[in-house]
Amino acid sequence: MKILLANPNATEAITEACRELAHRAASTGTEVIAWTNREGPPIVDSFYADYAAGRALSLALPRVAPPPDAVVLAGFGNYGTAPARMVPYTQDLIALLGAASRCAAVHSVNLLPLNETEPSPASAVTALTTAVAQVIAESGADLVVLGGARLSPYAARLRERVAVPIVEPVACGIQLAEAAVRLGLRQSKAGKFAAPPGFRQGEGA
C-alpha cells in the first residue's frame, strides 16, 4: 500500500516533521511518500491561505505519478502555534464542519516563528502541559487534539503528563487511510464533493 502524505504548505521542515510522524504510525508494508505543496503558501494560517493552498493542491496532486492508494492531507493550519487571531479562524472551521457542539474550546500556544530556533523539547512539553491543564480546568474538555505538525512530536511526552487522551492527527490520518484502502473505500465524488461543471482535474483556470 502506498500513501501520499501531502503537506498543503510549501515549508519543507513541516513536511519532514509530518513524514516522521507518519512513518511511526504506518503499518508494516505501508509505504509513506511525503510531498510538499511547493506552489502553496509557506504556512496555512488564514482563509486566504486555505484557498491559496487548495488551488495549488487541486492542480498538482492529480499529476502525481504513479497514483497512490490514498492521500493524507497533513494540514491542520498553524493552529496552536500562532497568535490569538488563529483562534476565531479555527472556531469558524469547526462550526463549518458541524462539530462546534462537540468542541469544548480552542486554545493557542505561542511558539517561536518557523524561521527561528525550535524550543527545547522540555520547554515545549511544559508549555503544552500548562495549556492542556488550563483548557481542562476552564472548559471540562476530556480529549485534546494537537493542531499543527510543530506540536505533534510532543504528543507521547504530553500523554505522560495529562489525564485526557492526546490525539495526534497525522497518525490518525495514516491509520484511517490504511483502513479505507483495505475496505475499498474512496472519497465521495457527488454532492458537495463533486467537481464544478466543466472542471477538468489538474488543469488551471
Image (tube, rainbow, N blue to C red):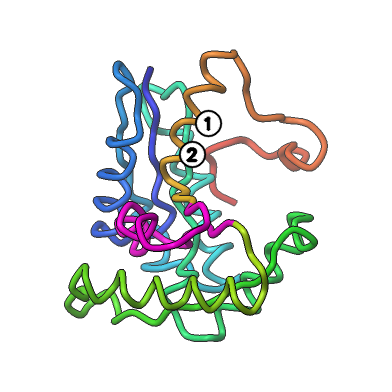
Give the residues drawn in magenta, as a range. Answer: 143-166
Mark 2 crowd level (few <14, some 14–19, many ≥20, 10 Å Cα): some
Q: Position of residue 104 (x, y in %)?
A: 69, 67
- Please name the residue shown 44% across and 54% down the image: 8
In the image, farthest residue toward the bottom: 84
Q: Position of residue 76 (x, y in %)?
A: 50, 58
Q: Position of residue 83 (x, y in %)?
A: 47, 85
Answer whether labels 2 and 1 touch (C-beta < 8 Å): yes
Q: Is residue 22 above or below residue 81?
A: above
Q: Which mark is residue 173?
A: 2
Q: Which quadrant holds the N terminus?
A: top left
- Circle 2 SS class: helix
Q: Disc 1 marks which residue?
A: 176
Q: Is residue 174 left or right of residue 32?
A: right
Q: Quadrant of residue 144?
A: bottom right
- Please name the residue shown 30% across and 24% down the image: 31
- Kindly identify the amino acid type of the residue bearing the numbered disc 1: Leu
Q: Is residue 25 above or below residue 97?
A: above
Q: As rendered, which of 194 and 3 lies closer to the eye?
A: 3
Q: Is residue 71 above or below residue 85?
A: above
Q: Position of residue 148 (x, y in %)?
A: 43, 61
- Please name the residue shown 52% across and 38% down the image: 202
Q: Is residue 26 left or right of residue 163?
A: left
Q: As rendered, which of 171 and 62 lies closer to the eye?
A: 171
Q: As rendered, which of 53 and 105 lies closer to the eye?
A: 105
- Kindly identify the amino acid type of the residue bearing the numbered disc 2: Gly
Q: Is residue 107 magenta?
A: no
Q: Is residue 5 left or right of residue 71?
A: left
Q: Is residue 161 magenta?
A: yes
